[in-house]
Image (cartoon, rainbow, N blue to C red):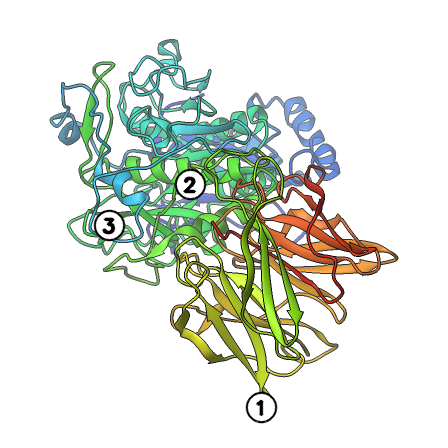
Amino acid sequence: MSTALAVATLAGVSTGAYAASDPGPTDGPAPLFQPLGAEVVKDHYIVVLKGKPKTADARASAKAVDRAKAKGIKVDKRFEHAINAYTATLTSEQLKFVRNDPAVDHVEADVITDLSGDSPAAAEEQVSPSAVETAPSWGLDRIDQLSLPLDGKYTYGNAGGPNVTVFVFGFGVSPTHKELTSLVDPGYVNAADAQLGTADCHGVGNAVASAVAGHTLGVAKGQNGSVRIRPVRITNCGSFGLVSLAKILDGLNWISASATGKSVVAYQGSWRSSGFGDNNAAAINSAVANMRSNGILFTIMGGFAASGNSSDMNMCDYAPQMMGLDGWLVVGLADANDTARGPWGQCVTIFAPAIGTRVAWKGSDTATIITDNLLASTAANGYTAGVVALAIKLNPSFTPAQIEQLVLAEAQPVVQGTVGGSDPLLLHWTAVTTPPPGEEGPDAPKDDIVIYRTSNGSGEWYVKRNEAGGTTSFAVFGHTHGGWAGDIPLTADFNGDKIADFVIYRVVNGIGTWYVQDGSDHHQLSNMWGVAHGSPGDIPFAGDFDRDGKADYGVYRIAPPPGGGGLVGRWYVKSGATNQPLADAWGVVHGSPGDVPVVGDLNADRKADFGVYRVTNGSGNWYFKANMTGRPQIASAWGVVHGGLEGDVPVVGNFNGDRYADLGIYRPNGGLGSWYVRSGASAGTQLIWGASHGGVAGDVPLAGNFG
């Protein structure tokens, strides 16, 4: 391949934009994209064929490669995984031939871009010869806190779940670095100095990888080596950051071919001088979109830091950063004061700690560095990729879009000084310290089984402990609260003391009214005593819908959907802390007439999800939607069959302490109330099976942790 450089100059095209040269009519030559103001590899092109990889259209268009070879064109690289394309050096006549092939979608000139954005000299001066600190950096410290000030701690634990690979894209990673020993798997190199392998010669790859899963500095540390690192080095050691578009596509194609299961690409490149402007970076955007559809998630570096928000770094002008418009994780930079620094615009979807935090570096196997403006993106991108890996481990059935929504839902809206429509969301993740899905831990809180019984006008509560030896002893016996005709009992922790409270929902003068007693000492909770929310016919529910550690309260109502139409189930949730409607949980549509609403955290994100229990042809079917943007179905709890016999009552609770709510059936039979609970993480696993509690006519089964 020719390495000679030329600058393309197209009249009438603004600097940094792609121009389509003579695209012609719809049956004419394929468009040719050539950038103005960028260095191009002379006469070298990416020929993008029609059809997504591995489809019938792609197989049909592959004949274009044979036709090109028959014309004497030497194909340098054939891409069949991330994108359906090939690269070649073409004469003007060969270019014309290729563009007129009906299987060609478009042709792009190969360009030189700079993954680094600047010389590493300034950062080089800051290399620390000391060993990696055992105390967490401020960046880690910030990630597991909701707000400032810092507490000097970072809590982490094994999330369980499958192995997850994070591909560090662009630069090498040194497997012998103290932060990364035993974590790095074989990678890929496409550079002029390929004989040097995939070790890091610039420091950037080590920095990103250590922020992902470094033994001391990584957000996803403590996973028993199950978060893996694979480097993809496409930069030469002698030319810091300079690569061609063809090499970028080659690296992405290798990742797409090599990835097994859901994976993450920490994409380290900002295209400061690439000429990828005006949304015309078709090959890059197509490749990353194809990979994402196959379960490969991206965290995309959002540029470089500055003393303030740099006016020339609107990320929507860059590729693939422009993917942030579709909700991808394009990572902006925040300092220790939660202030945005550098890149901006609505394509920046999340911010992460970046400036002044510690990461691994080059020069020795113990070298670390404090990130400056140029290196800030390595920490921010690495931290975010590590959090994505943890989210995948906890939710392996989630789609890439659902994982992204989960990470964005966890983030906190605290970033100051955002510009151009950036959401002020700061990366946040609280470690999983309870057991993996389906596994019981000795200290994990577990919900008890509860019966509410009306006797002589009093509502009596009977709670059997969920203990290792079974459900035999009582935590609560005969406590009274409620008992009026029509009272509906519930349990939920409204004051955040980790103990369930006693809740009565009562319609008074046509208004649904809530009365909550503390589950520990039975006093009235003043902010939840006599609170109005609901109407006759509504079904009440309670759970933590905003992840503040305290229960919220709501009603499920059969009503027309927005815009009119047939009746559906609508959910209206108010904050238990402020008694104000929760905007993200007000009017949610899920359910049909006859469904029973149920709530619980079925995806371990510490927020209650929206569920319905529906009996169809004698089978009890469970359908949960996630409490996040778009309300995606939770695959592990969608269409699960459990229950359905006449008289069965659904009960949801966390019965094994694994962070996932479980699906229970209370079945009255011959004076006995029998409990049958299946794991919410693995619906086939029986947890409590046949335990006896209740059985008196009119008993209402519930679940809650009463200590």
For mark 1, does the 10 Å Cα neighbourhood hold few (<14), some (14 to 19), or many (20 or more) residues? few
In the picture as drawn, the residue positioned furthest to the top comes out as 195
Residue linked to disc 2: 299
Indicate the amino acid at tag 2.
Answer: Thr
What SS does tag 3 mark? loop
Q: Which is nearer the N-term, disc 1 or disc 3?
A: 3
Of badges 1 and 2, the one in the foreground is 1
Q: Residue at x 40, y 33 (%)?
A: 157
**Residue 206 horizontal/vertical position (percent):** 31, 24
> Residue 304 appears in which quarter of the rendering?
top left
Q: Nearer the viewer, residue 4 or 478?
A: 478
Q: Residue at x 48, y 66 (%)?
A: 552
Q: Which is nearer the N-term, disc 1 or disc 2?
A: 2
What SS does tag 2 mark? strand
In the picture as drawn, the residue positioned furthest to the right comes out as 617
Residue linked to disc 3: 342
Image quadrant holding the N terminus, namely top left
Of badges 3 and 2, the one in the foreground is 2
Q: Nearer the viewer, residue 448 or 294?
A: 448
Q: CA distance from mark 1 to mark 2?
A: 54 Å
Residue linked to disc 1: 509
Indicate the amino acid at tag 3.
Answer: Gly
Indicate the amino acid at tag 1.
Answer: Asn
Of badges 1 and 3, the one in the foreground is 1
**Residue 13 horizontal/vertical position (percent):** 38, 54
